[in-house]
Image (cartoon, rainbow, N blue to C red):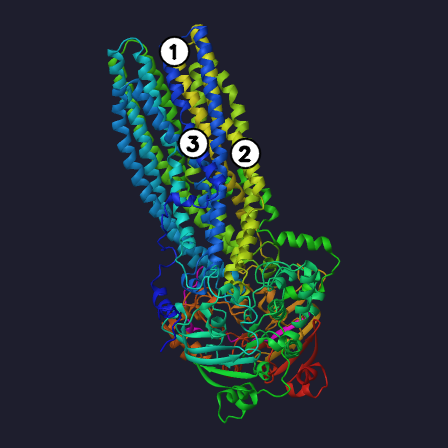
Amino acid sequence: MIPSLNGDGSNPTTLRKMLYPLLPKSGAVKTKGASYFALFRPLQDVQSRLILATGVVLALAAGAPLPIIGVIFARIINHFPPSEEDVRTRIYQLLAVAIAYFAVTWGWAFCWGIVGARVSRGLRTQMVHRALGLDQTYYETQCPDITSRLTVDAQTVQSGTAEKVGIFLQSISYFIVAFIVGFVLNARLTGILFAAVIPSMTIVICTGTTVLSRFSKESSESTTEAASIAEGAIKAVQVVQAFDAFDTLTKDHENHLKVAMRVGLKKAIAGAVLLGSVFFIAYAANALAFWQGSKIAESSSNGGAGTVYAIVFLILDASFVIGQAGPFIQSFSAAASAGRRILSLIDYPDIPIDVYSKDGLPADQQTLGPEKEITFNDVSFSYPARALDTVLNNINLKIDTGTTVGIVGSSGSGKSTIAALLLRLYDPCQGSIIIDGQTIPSYNLSSLRNQIALVDQDPAVFSGTVYTNIRDGYKGDLLPEEDMRERCVEAAKAADAWTFIESLPYGFETWLGEPGGTKLSGGQKQRLCLARALVGNPSLLVLDEATSALDTISEAAILTSLGKSRSMKHRTTVMIAHRLASVKSADNIIVMGRGHILEQGSHDALISIPNGAYRSLIEAQKLSPNSPPEHEVSTPAEVAIIETDKSDSEEKQHEIESLSSGYTPDEAMSFGTIQIIGRCLALSRSRVFFTLLALVGALITGGLILGESIIFGHLVSLLNGPVNASRVDFYCLMFFVVSLAALIGYITSGSCFGIVSEHLIMRTRDLSLRTILRQDMEWFLQSGRSTSSLVSVISMDSGHLSGLSGVIIGTMVSALVSVVGGAILAHIVAWKIAIVLFATSPVVVLAGFFRFRVLAKLEEKNQLAYTEAASLATEACSSIRTIAALGTEKATSKRFDLAIDKYREQTFRSTALGNLLLAFALSITYFVYSLAYWWGAKQVRSGEYSSLQFFIVLPAILFSAQAAGQIFSLAPDIGRAKGAASRVFALHDQKPGIDITSHTTTATPTPTPISEVKRSSSSTGAIKFQNVSLTYQSRPNAPIFTNLNLSIKAGETVALVGRSGAGKTSTISLIERFYDPTGGSILLDGIDIKSVPVQQHRARISLVAQDPDLFSGSVAFNVGLGARPGHVATREDVIEACKAVGIHDFVSGLPDGYETQCGNNGSQLSGGQKQRVAIARAYIRDPEILLLDEATSALDSQSEAQIQEAITAVSRKRTTIMIAHRLTSVQKADRILVFDKGKIVEEGRHEDLMRGGGIYEQMIKA
């Protein structure tokens, strides 16, 4: 019987397994109330809601002044030309309206600027908080793209919830108030217009926004998939270059971008049709209004012309304003679509394993204290992503507290799963785990994890200093800084990390760089993570291959230190290891196999069982009492960082500051606006026809005010005197012609600019990823080039280029044509009136310019803050298992909040100033009204111009001023686009030192099956280093090699051994040509590898690195990536490679066989399984040179023995260079090279070196 976990006898863990596959997938979560209005949910505090309410009220109030202007103008027309007294009265009225409009406009613009920033910030913080609290099941089954949501989606939401909302509300308000005033003045005429305009506008807008919303969602999904591919490729760039997977991955990325582009084209066309229809209705309504108004004016008493004019003026402008609000509908639609993706994560259904829950029994040190036990009762488990694949099958196990338990077994046998269940990263599918008489779910999750520390096989080190990384492991009460630092030092010493920490340039304060601790070697990261685990003095210490990257000397020192620890007597330690020397002294050793416990007991008891599983593992590993020491793999960054001068404090500060920021190259500041536009046009030259057609459409839409002003002036003049019906009918017909021109112009402009924009974004994103993947390894070691910041350039910055090519640029061109055309028309008709009115233009332009500068600088600083915060969140979510084990979900969320709030106060000030200038730019129109009335009336009274000329010039100038205001309202989008373009083009201009695309043919080779490929008879694989020196650019004062000479014969198997930092990995990196030597030359078959095209050179080499990076895709896809350039791996080739390295049975046993998805970075496979897939990927290339850098570090002894046999078999036909910690794996090498401080100090066969009394023999006998 399954133990009950609830009082009612139900077992939620069994239900969990049944229900999780039924939960909605990412992007499909039914988010309650996930409409556009749901985006404002973060505004929960009173202040934010008050700002929102104030913004709504003021924006609606801002719609009232213009209808009032209409009434004033009606009185002006009725008494035109007016008397001096009338002029003064009307001017005072106009100025009062202008001042009121300025005040309310500044008020709503400021409020909505703050609202947009707070909505974006709130959604970002809520999303990160929720993402950090979700369990492992979510991350395995949903594969969330946190980076894209934090950057692209959040920015889209901010754009659609800020000042544009205020403009839209003002437009709606004006529309409503205009009709109210119209009904008061003349209900019949207004009613006719109302019946014609409202239903048609409603149908068009509702239909259009629905279609736009659907297309926005589809486009967003494809863009997210493309971003995920880009992120995976950048993370594993070394594998991409080593196997020339550049074309495969960039093509996959490009295909997803093309899908997004096709949907984007549909969205652009739909938006253009919507906008064209809105303007068609607006202008057609004016034709109807003047036609009907002429009939009313003809039959009315004195004053009818003014009333008709007022109604026509109001309806005309109301319709025009509604039409101008059209482009914002696309922003709101895009914001709603992006918001749904964010809210789908925030509103993800409640999960059984809730780290934020306060429910449950408190766990303390007594819970896992002396004389307690941990019991597994009939525990079965399957990972949610592979529910049919049972990992643990009815496990029964008892762990006494205060003891050390070793868990060994083959890869995939369930060892790491036991560790995950102890931390409650998952719940069992069946059975229960009991601690101190209570089931694990009975305890409060946070308090339980506070008693447990985990050191994982893949050590996760976070951006920050050495000290902050160790400090993160402390889970107790707050300590004074001095005590905390002392505690960290003790933990570092216990983890054998203190020596290397002291050797770092700045000791504890050394900045570790971007996510993953790229400044440290694998062994250093493991020791650092072990120190982090020990600093909290945990009651239960779980070591999952925690010393796999260490040599046995370091490992022995750590185990001895742990044994001497005063707290060790009461600590329970669970050690999972492939290297059996690590668990020899354990109190109990558990041997796992295929999800079952095969044996358990002490080392002596298990070794005495004839043909036992443990004994077989021992024999396969050939373990001896004096186990050979196994040495760390050093990275270029490690060697450099150890040997850097500690006194360079200025460099340290620069490093810390630059690493904390995103990708912000200096070149980004050198691009001018004209230069950026030129670059955009160059990328869009294949769409030059659509660009020209779009410009024609923009010219039509911008030129509409010319015809409108002329028609308007004639109709007002006709209505102000005896009505000539035929002439009125003619000009009304012309208004209808203008409406048709508006329909054609806006559809043409919007569609064509949309085509150009979508193509530009697709090209830019594609080119950005290609540029990044072309860079050499040195480029990635430089500051500010984390995966998340580079993905941000691809996804977010490239997307912002729409501000220089799409609907926004179409609106800009149209507005500029309106301004210029209106000015020309006004000067031709009445230059004396026009020249005075246009004297106000510099004021408008300067106000808009300064606002543009203020908001552009604010956007630049916000971009830095958002990139830094997104990098932090992405780093945490990609290492969510470590975050959960450390229990730092809340602390990480708080760090994210602080990062995103970095410029919060400055945002407040800049928003106030920027929108003050916006209010001035928009309200200046009303001041121009006053000036126009005073000066125009004066000119007409003097007989200089007629009323007809005045009423042509007035709308031309006023509509031009409105167009200018519209330009400045788009300043934030333009500024954002300009900054983004500078970053994108600065990236595009990066030139790699080692270009993987250089000297390659432009023709695409016809794919050839691998079975038909034959090696060149001239290729043998002989390698020679001639006086090679190497110094990395990032550390010019720390040479790795000086005059290194090395010769490797073709077909020879050579092993590289030595202490950390000796240069072993650097040797392999030079052979792969990840770096070029700073002196000397490297010859392959007698030819300098620099003279050979990089692609051709690497085609002869296969690499298996210590970290087996896999890509999202099937097992077959990942193995097939190893095929030589221009060749395709068939299914038979893949199967043959897998059989050769001994994983065919394992792959065939997966739920979908060779089509089983590996997940992001191979998350669906164990460490050993990933390593073997990586070896198969290397084998399928049939290389002349095989490079093995800790290729079997994640394998158990039996699997390692199998792989070693396969490697031995395939090595007979190729040159093999291997680095290994387990020296037993290199003893059969033809030659062993012992490195020390960048020099080869010994070389020979194992037997020869054992007789020499040198370093190698000392390592063996240590």
Which mark is first along the chain, 1 or 2? 2
Indicate whether residue 453 is drawn in magenta.
no
Please tell me whether mark 1 or mark 3 is closer to you in this view: 3
Magenta-colored span:
1001-1027
Taking the image as shown, residue 564 lies to the left or right of residue 595, namely right
Please tell me whether mark 2 or mark 1 is closer to you in this view: 2
Indicate whether residue 1013 is drawn in magenta.
yes
Q: Main secondary structure of the magenta part?
A: loop
According to the picture, the residue beneath numbered tag 1 turns out to be 947
**Residue 22 in picture, x, y percent from top left:** 33, 63
Please tell me how crowded label 2 is: few (under 14), some (14-19), or many (20+) other residues with Cα within 10 Å: some
Closer to the camera in the image, 411 or 115:
115
Q: Secondary structure at mark 2?
A: helix
According to the picture, the residue beneath numbered tag 2 turns out to be 912
Taking the image as shown, residue 362 lies to the left or right of residue 282, namely right
Label 2 sits on what residue type?
Answer: Ala
Instruction: Tell me, yes or no, if residue 1015 can be seen here.
Output: no
Please tell me how crowded label 1 is: few (under 14), some (14-19), or many (20+) other residues with Cα within 10 Å: many
Q: Secondary structure at mark 1?
A: helix
